[in-house]
Amino acid sequence: MSKITIYKEPGFEILFEFAGNKIALLHCNVDKITHSKLRKWLAVFENTKQAFVYLGIEKLIAITPNPKFAEIFLGHYVKDYDEQYKVYLWDLN
């Protein structure tokens, strides 16, 4: 399945793809982070989560090499995917 862009601006992009029944894989592309941009991106991400709830998505999953960024966005660590990547979950229920 292809990725769908739901938000894009220079330096930040949120994409997703459906992964199964009520689950979406989350993809975030981030360049340089500044404090002011981070506050805006957190607000965008909160709105994005509400849009997923509206679509019937109950869980977002991200496999990331940057766990600090996932934790800033309040993702919950699930497990190591491999030596480089970690799995994070957002439960939208």
Image (spheres, helix red, strand yellow):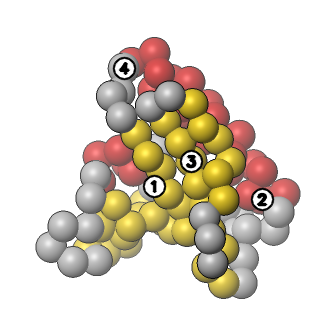
Q: Toward which corner of the image does residue 53 lie, by quadrant?
A: bottom right
> Which quadrant holds the C terminus?
bottom right
Crowding around mark 2 (Cα neighbors within 10 Å: few <14, some 14 to 19, many 20+) is some
Which residue has dot 4 on it? 34
| Pointers 2 and 3 in contact (C-beta within 8 Å) | no
Q: From mark 1 to mark 4, how far is it between C-alphas?
A: 20 Å
Helix, strand or loop for disc 2: helix
Which residue has dot 3 on it? 14
Q: Amino acid at mark 1?
A: Gly
Q: From mark 2 to mark 3, how far is it between C-alphas?
A: 16 Å
| Pointers 1 and 4 in contact (C-beta within 8 Å) | no
- Residue 89, position in %: x, y? 48, 65
| Pointers 2 and 1 in contact (C-beta within 8 Å) | no
Please name which of the two marks, 1 or 4, marks the residue nearer to the observer.
4
Q: Amino acid at mark 2?
A: Val
- Vertical position of residue 37 compared to residue 28: above or below: above
Q: Residue at x 15, y 73 (%)?
A: 83
Checking the image for residue 67, the label placed there is none
Q: From mark 3 to mark 4, how far is it between C-alphas?
A: 17 Å
